[in-house]
Image (cartoon, rainbow, N blue to C red):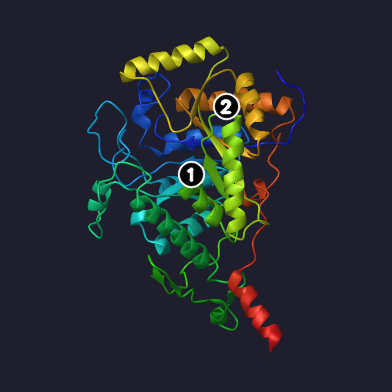
Amino acid sequence: MSSAPSAPLHLAVALDGTGWHPASWREPVARPRDLFTAGYWADLVAEAERGLLDFVTLEDGLGPQSSHPFEPDGRTEEVRGRLDAVLVAARVAPLTRHIGLVPTTVATHTEPFHISKAIATLDYVSTGRAGLRVQITARPNEADHFGRRTIPHIDSYDSPVVTDLFDEAADYVEVVRRLWDSWEDDAEIRDAATGRFVDRDKLHYIDFQGKHFSVKGPSITPRPPQGQPVVTALAHQAVPYRLVARQADVGYVTPHDADDARAIVEEIRAEQQAAGRGAELLHIFGDLVVFLDDDQAAAEDRRTRLDALAGEPYTSDARVFAGTPAQLADLLQELAAEGLSGFRLRPAVAGHDLPAITRGLVPELQRRNAFRRAYEADTLRGLLGLPRPANRYAAATAAAAATV
């Protein structure tokens, strides 16, 4: 075990069903009968908060889960079906006090106006702990659920179709961010004596006109407590790296070794400079699927047993780790040395590997002075060291007034 001190890491967990391994629901600790209850999700998030994690992400989608990237798979021996991630986060928020809540939304078929007020509402319900994980979908069957557009069948993420979907997602986030700013922080007067509830001069049209959206605004929800809830996105290659660099506060990447991590960080930092955001704090988190046990052989055996239940070896876009908390701590510190500021861990079996993270990995990192021992902020932006941004429209109004 390394005993050398290192910079404190940020840690998040990605919650998806009963876990990221497709056979996870068949484990005794999995609770598959509780999967569509509020209590199940509340218990997972409470465990994550017990471990002082920065935030949890909640997976979502617009079609049944599939092992194929672009079409349904028809499988019935794996978890299928989801609850709405934003609504789950809103249900869990009052039961927690510190941890960030970052539901997933699919930009491709949802309206930015709806999501802007949903996440703003979540920020109010959680008193400043909301975030958003934006993703795209290139599945034709999901387009068919809405009937407003068609997406051609593709067989690679290198397709121009995917590039356009990521450009659309960047515009989507821009609209959402502008809508969050469309009310100034002090727009609500609430003066019963004068009968003035709101200052109309402090509500702003955003007048966004782009290739994908035409949105006038303003929002119907006042500016969120954080000003701008935290925006996050998963990225595997150059096109989504640009989305992270242009619009995200946190990007999740999938390096498989230290050299890979260094190259990814360098590419995203270059894109960040090109986007004119070089001076802004942009976190880059590494994603890993984890099988954690007190003994490495036990973790590897568990993975093998689950693979046998699934009928095939488990593979992932992210590196799959099977070992002990100390070994994982070594790996995280090795990857962090290449420029990653945190990690989003995907528990292979939520009921087993999430407690192994909070009760095994976290104490190990604390012994190395590499993770917090108490929550040090009341908002998600605060936990991540992100300043509360000024309102763009208030700043523009003040600048205009100063020139008169």
- In this rendering, would 39 be left or right of 333? left
Residue located at (43% from left, 74% from top): 216
- In the displayed structure, 113 sits above or below 82; it is below
Residue located at (65% from left, 56% from top): 278
Q: Nearer the viewer, residue 391 or 226?
A: 391
- In this rendering, would 330 be left or right of 167? right
Q: Which of 382 and 400 is in front in this view?
A: 400
Q: For mark 2, what is the residue?
A: 357
Q: Which of the image's four quarters has the C terminus?
A: bottom right
Return the x and y of residue 224 as percentages of the image width and height.
56, 61
Q: How many labels does the image show?
A: 2
Q: Is mark 2 on a helix, strand or loop?
A: helix
Residue located at (53% from left, 76% from top): 203
Q: For mark 1, what is the residue?
A: 235
- In the displayed structure, 398 sits above or below 175; it is below
- In the displayed structure, 398 sits above or below 3; it is below
Of mark 2 and mark 1, the one earlier in the sequence is 1
Return the x and y of residue 27 as percentages of the image width and height.
39, 19
- In three-dimensional space, the C-alpha distance between marks 2 and 1, rounded to whole angstroms, equals 24 Å
- In this rendering, would 6 be left or right of 148? right
Label 2 neighbourhood size at 10 Å, few (<14), some (14-19), many (20+)?
Answer: many
Q: Which of 158 and 347 is in front in this view?
A: 158
What amino acid is at disc 2? Ile
For residue 265, the mark is: none
User: Is residue 49 visible to the viewer in this orientation of the structure?
Assistant: no
What amino acid is at disc 1? Ala
Return the x and y of residue 351 as percentages of the image width and height.
46, 25
Q: Is mark 1 on a helix, strand or loop?
A: loop
Residue extending farthest to the bottom is 404
Return the x and y of residue 111 as percentages of the image width and height.
37, 61
